[in-house]
Amino acid sequence: MAGPQALIEHLISEDRYPILFFLFSRAGVERNAGEMAERLSLLREEDVIRVSALAESLPEQVRRLHPALVRCLPRGIGFHHAGLLPAARQAVEELFVRGYLPVVFCTETFALGVNFPARTVVLGAMTKRDDQGYRQLLAREVLQISGRAGRRGTDQRGYAYFVINPAYPEETPATPPEVPEAVGRELELTPGAVLRLTLRYEGSRSEIKRYFANSFAAFRLRRQREELEVELQAARRELQRFSQVTGCPAVQPDSACAAEVWRRRASLEASLRHEEAILTDAARALRAMRKPRRRSRQQARADQASQRVAKLRQELAGLPEPGACPHAGAAPDPAGCPAFDERRSLLQHLRSRLLGLRRMPDPAAGLWRTFARQRGSLSRAGFIQEGLLADKGRLALAAGPGGVFFAEILSRIAGDPRPADLASWAAGSLCESDERKGAFKPEVIRSAAMHLRLAGLPVMYSPADARALLAWAQGAEVAVAAETGEIAPGDFVALARRVAETLRGSAQALPRLEAVLWAAHGAVWRDEVADVFGTG
């Protein structure tokens, strides 16, 4: 992507600001904001004084971890992404709303669930990276970001710009999308979801099946089946109309069409001649051979050719006599029949609709099979007993999303663990990313993981996340804890808040370890993690 300075200067001169400049990497957001701040100053002198004072009043951790942001803000330029500390994000959002940041470089998280519209949005790239590599932006992503352009009650219109990469101009669409992609059916039956359904319906097979039948996934498949049936009826009506117009027996099987019979017979006769030649050669070679092994192989070849010849003759005998073709007589050439190709296309369309209906799965049955497999694994692991939730299953639900692993860990603790260790194990057990997972180090973690895997349940553990929370629970500053876990400060705070929720829920559900779990919660819920409003 070329430098954004020329575009930003143009938008400022045309009074098309404030501007949200969307990029899809945190490093790109910070780099571009820093470069712009070195070249442009977009605030009046009195506003520079106000913003500088606010930047200097930010918490010490923010100023120490995000010095680039502190330098950018007095220039009227900000940046925003999930890796920033909450107090830093809060400062950028507040300054943007108050009109002190004409330009903010941001990732797409700024367009999700945050109501900060601008006069202009710029998409700095039309590709983004996901788990499978780089891909084009979806229409709904483009529309979601573009929808930030235009402030109700302030702007008569909003502006959305697409930056064209000169090396890959084809990545940018010639016209913006008008409608988003259809919402796909997705009902992920995680172990936690299976436990919730088991608790909600008390293990009732009929109630759970009814739930699946009423799910959005089942609704989407029913809608697709209805659409296929409508298309099937339309295809049949079109064939009927075609038959009336052309005189061809289009609604009958293929053999009723003279041209189709002619084509099929010609194809079968050509295949028959080929197989008869193979059979003749095999018989001639067989008579000339004397060695038993060679004669045996050649006899097998001759037998196979004989079977194919018999099958082809049977198919030929089963073909009906072609009737008179309304277009070309009794023995028409399909290439010369003006209606042949259209009729064949209509029949292929009809067959594809029929095949689609036959292959359409029963969504409720498929979801039930997945549920039953997961329930079996949870029963073997002791989370479900006799179809109902066991105490360990209730603990897993109380621990929150990803709580199955942590509940298994807690069930194996005999004495009184250190609060910092509990916080560490909770953080590691909440791992959901292949990039963060690693080896199971403590013995209690290894034994819990082995038990779950033998039961057939998925297990991931992040030693890096565990180290980060261990350092934090032992009193380290947020910068140290994040560096220990090789994680961005904002991501660390988000992880620590999840851990605090897991510890709080577990303490309420497990009286045996209630005191130490609350102590672990207290060690995590402090300073930046407890500062939910980002005030510092």
Image (cartoon, rainbow, N blue to C red):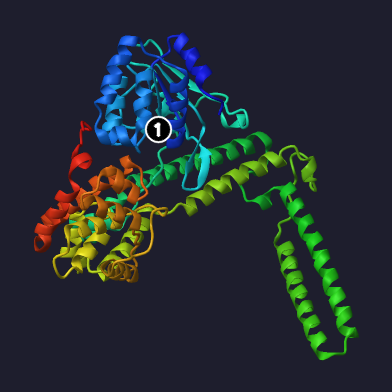
Callout 1: SS: helix
The quadrant where residue 270 appears: bottom right
Counting the numbered discs, the total is 1
Left or right for 180, reference 491? right
Left or right for 252, reference 422? right
- The foreground one among 351 and 402 is 402
The relative height of residue 113 versus residue 501 in the rendered view (above or below) is above
> Which residue appears at 91% of the width and 84% of the height?
288
Q: Residue 323, image x and y in percent?
A: 73, 49
The quadrant where residue 349 appears: top right
- Residue type highlighted by circle 1: Glu
The relative height of residue 277 versus residue 22 in the rendered view (above or below) is below
Q: Residue 277, image x and y in percent?
A: 85, 69
Left or right for 45, reference 29? left
Q: Residue 502, image x and y in percent?
A: 20, 52
- The foreground one among 177 and 118 is 118
The quadrant where residue 283 appears: bottom right
> Which residue appears at 57% of the width and 48% of the height?
351
- Quadrant containing the N terminus in the rendered view: top right
Q: Residues within 10 Å of mark 1 (few under 14, many from 20)?
A: some
Res. 443 visible in picture: yes
- The residue at which mark 1 appears reads as 108
Spot the residue most to the right.
288
